[in-house]
Amino acid sequence: MSEKPGDMTPVVDLTRERGTGPIRTRRPIYVDLLPPCNNACPAGENIQAWLALAQARKFRAAWETLVRDNPLPAVHGRVCYHPCESNCNRGDVDSPVSIHAVERFLGDLAAQQAWPMPQNAAPSGKRVLVVGAGPSGLSAAYHLARLGHAVEIREAGPVPGGMLHFGIPAYRLPRSESPTLECLSAATRKSPGTISRVRRARARAGPDRRGNGAGAASAAGGSRR
């Protein structure tokens, strides 16, 4: 008769490796990091939040989450170079999520349904002048209005939009999608004016509050004259 072989599996001594076993010398720490798509988004959108709502067909809730960070989703969905998709984890499995297409869909749906822009704050009693109705000026006015401030935009050009209107061709950004001030907030009103009026507004704003470059915004509290 042959002897039955013994168990050759070694006994693991968990006390020798001082990691996270019975004897621990290291403590796990939870670190809250941004998803790759959020981290890559130039507008800082909460992408995974509104994508989850859109997947659940809660389109208005998805749009409201989106416009907390970006007031022009229909525009961005058409002209943004979407680095979020280049950093999407799904690309390692098959193909990235078409984030810009969903963003464009939500922006177009909001325009079709005439959803009002959400406002989260009561009127503050403060007034702000924004010089320039380019993308920066429109965004600044929108976020200021959401904080409860009364905002006026002064633009020297014939239409709002700045580089969105004059710098991007119509085949890429149809003129029907050009931003209008009415979509931003009821508290925001346009004052087209002339270049001289805009220059006077810049002078009142002061050199420390002037925007530089195309589409830059200048904001200053005070007069509406």
Image (tube, rainbow, N blue to C red):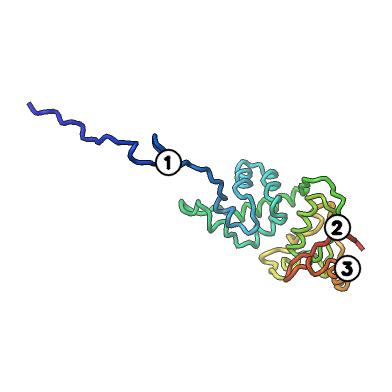
211 shown above or below 115: below
**Relative horizontal placement of residue 44, taking residue 189 as reference (left or right):** left
Q: Earlier in the sequence, mark 1 or mark 2?
A: 1
On the question of residue 29 being in view, the answer is yes
184 shown above or below 57: below
Q: Crowding near pointer 3: few (<14 within 10 Å), some, many (20+)?
A: few
| Label 2 sits on residue | 189
Q: Are marks 3 and 1 in contact (CB under 8 Å)?
A: no
Numbered label attached to residue 25: 1
Say which element carries label 1: loop
Q: Position of residue 3 (x, y in %)?
A: 11, 28
Q: For this rendering, which residue is in front, 131 or 135?
A: 131
**Which of label 3 and label 1 is nearer to you?**
1
Say which element carries label 2: strand
**Which of label 1 and label 2 is nearer to you?**
1
Q: Which residue corresponds to the image point at 64% horizontal and 52% vertical from the top-left?
A: 45
Q: Position of residue 63 (x, y in %)?
A: 69, 48
How far apart are the alpha carbons under marks 2 and 3?
13 Å
Numbered label attached to residue 193: 3
Q: Position of residue 148 (x, y in %)?
A: 82, 49
Q: Position of residue 9 (x, y in %)?
A: 24, 35
